[in-house]
Amino acid sequence: MSKSIMLLIAGILFAWLVISIITKNFDGDFLLILLLGVSIGYGVGKKEQKD
């Protein structure tokens, strides 16, 4: 994984934590869906670069 992907994931986790603290709702569904979307997008983008 590249440095930019690691920073993106760290940013997602930090934003989720801050929003969860403010709303007092630590629901992991939003976090899981967002991380899944990032991983799928990264895989598709990496595959398109090879072609």
Image (cartoon, grey):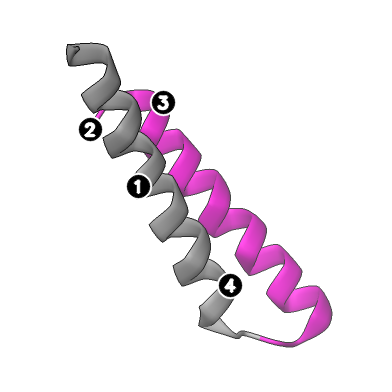
Q: Nearer the viewer, mark 1 or mark 3?
A: 1
Label 1 sits on what residue type?
Ile
Label 2 sits on what residue type?
Met
43 is higher (above) or lower (below) than 30:
above
13 is higher (above) or lower (below) than 6:
below
Q: Which residue is mark 1?
A: 40
Tag of residue 30: 4
Residue neighbourhood size for the residue with mark 3, other residues' Cα within 10 Å, grouped as few (<14), some (14–19), many (≥20):
few
Range of residues picked out in magenta? 1-25
Residue neighbourhood size for the residue with mark 2, other residues' Cα within 10 Å, grouped as few (<14), some (14–19), many (≥20):
few
Tag of residue 12: none
1 is higher (above) or lower (below) than 10:
above
Q: Nearer the viewer, mark 3 or mark 4?
A: 4
Q: Residue at x 22, y 26 (%)?
A: 47
**Answer yes or no: do the residues labelled 1 and 3 have beta carbons within 8 Å?**
no
Taking the image as shown, residue 36 lies to the left or right of residue 24, namely left
Q: What is the C-alpha distance between the residues marked 2 and 4?
A: 22 Å
Whichever of labels 3 and 4 marks the residue nearer the N terminus, that label is 3
Q: Quadrant of residue 46?
A: top left
Label 4 sits on what residue type?
Phe
Q: Which residue is mark 3?
A: 4
Give the main secondary structure, helix, strand or loop, of the magenta stretch: helix
Q: Nearer the viewer, mark 4 or mark 1?
A: 1
Tag of residue 1: 2
Q: Residue at x 34, y 26 (%)?
A: 45
